Image (cartoon, rainbow, N blue to C red):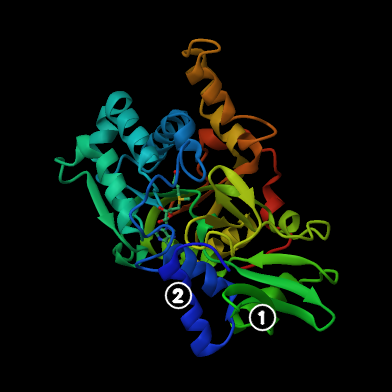
Amino acid sequence: MSTGHPELIAVIASEIADSGPIPFVRFMELALYHPQFGYYMRSPQERIGWRGDFYTSSDVHPILGQALAKQAEQMYRLLGQPNPFTIVEMGPGKGLLAKHILTTCAHRYPSFFEHLRYVLVDRSPAMRELQRRNLAPWLDRAALLAWVDDLANVAPQGLTGLFFSNELVDSFPVHRLQVTAKGIEELSVDYRDGKFVECLMPLSSSALVHRLRRMNADWPEGYRTEINLPASEWMKQVAQRLDRGFVLTIDYGHSQQDLYRSDRKHGTFLCYSRQSVNEDPFLRVGEQDMTAHVDFSSLAAAGEEQKLHMTGFTNQMNFLMGLGVEQMIAELEQDSPQFKAAIHLLRPNGMGTTFKVLIQHKGIRRPELDGLRYKPFFGSALTEQSAA
Ligand SMILES: C[S@@+](CC[C@H](N)C(=O)[O-])C[C@H]1O[C@@H](n2cnc3c(N)ncnc32)[C@H](O)[C@@H]1O
């Protein structure tokens, strides 16, 4: 028997009974985002956080939000102090980063704060409710905060400011692929004897075929990997809404060359439940998170097609160092829990390097940003083998 949320299992099983095996990407969409029963869509007992299934940087220490506020304020000055300067945060989860950013702006950058408008985009009503709770102190400032459920509901064009996200793109549903003697096939999901089981089917979409062609995919037999098509579509939508400003994307991921190395033969798909990791999406269906590492080259290429140019690509450690995190940490008591938590975000063998930061710009020439002062990757890291 597959375990998980019983109504969700019934919905997916019934779709399979009607249409035959479904591509994995559809299974992941339903498991995470089915409107009633999906993992992110139900009223959460705690999902994100130390008592949840996984934690993110904003659970560790406010220092990332403080650094992002500093970076946003520099962007605001570079753009000529527009009023309003809009920050659109996509997939804000519990809203902790928004809370840390707004607190920092209100205290350290009062004139920037006066011009700031902050829009939160989250498809989950349950998450939007949590965000409202965490942002309660600002709810009475009508011009400051707004919520939408879909990027499509952010008016196209005309926006000046910053689109940013932390661990959004890794939560988009992915196509999973396997190379067999027949070529590249798509992992699909069937339901037999009360259990979800994997099967292989021909590629389910022409967009996927097109992407693989552009990537010149040439992997050995047995190779498994993922393709995140919604990520490129998302970047296109973002670019179309930004008139002047920046897009800042934080997530775990790699350049395309690195992500699809022939020795990464099991892919990067993982499930998170109660702070532990597994590779079985048919366990705790709808009660565990699923993710795959992000292909930053595809994001950069999708942006370029919409005149969103690459400002730079770095990792979280270098991003934070460029924004003066050393000074911020020096203000903390050495070896205090806060000190240790802040260091956790910088660890060279952990969050400091696993997490990458991509910044793109539009309507401004060659901006120099403090967060990109140190770049461990050369400028061409994302464009050596381009993809869209
Ligand atoms: C892993 S959580 C993000 C964590 C959060 N940014 C943080 O720093 O703690 C992913 C979030 O993205 C939201 N989400 C996923 N796909 C989305 C989409 N297409 N549009 C808007 N929100 C989305 C989910 O509802 C969830 O709140």
Q: Is residue 85 visible?
A: no
According to the picture, the residue beneath numbered tag 2 turns out to be 10
Q: Which mark is residue 209?
A: 1
Does the residue tagged 1 have its C-beta within 8 Å of any atom of ligand 1?
A: no
In front: 77, or 95?
95
Amino acid type, residue under disc 1 in the picture: Val
* Residue 332, image x, y percentages: 47, 14
Other residues around mark 1 within 10 Å, as few (<14) / some (14–19) / many (≥20)? few
86 versus 22 height, above or below: above
The quadrant of the image that shows the C terminus is: bottom right
The residue positioned 36% from the left and 68% from the top of the image is 35
x 45%, y 39%: residue: 49
Residue 182 badge: none
Helix, strand or loop for disc 2: helix
Quadrant location, the N terminus: bottom right
Residue count near mark 2 (Cα–Cα under 10 Å), binned few <14, some 14–19, many ≥20: few
Relative vertical location of residue 138 with respect to residue 126 in this rendering, above or below: above
Determine the secondary structure under disc 1.
helix
- Image quadrant, ligand 1: bottom left
Badge 1 vs badge 2, beta-carbon distance below 8 Å: no
**Residue at the image point whose x is 61% and y is 57% from the top:** 292
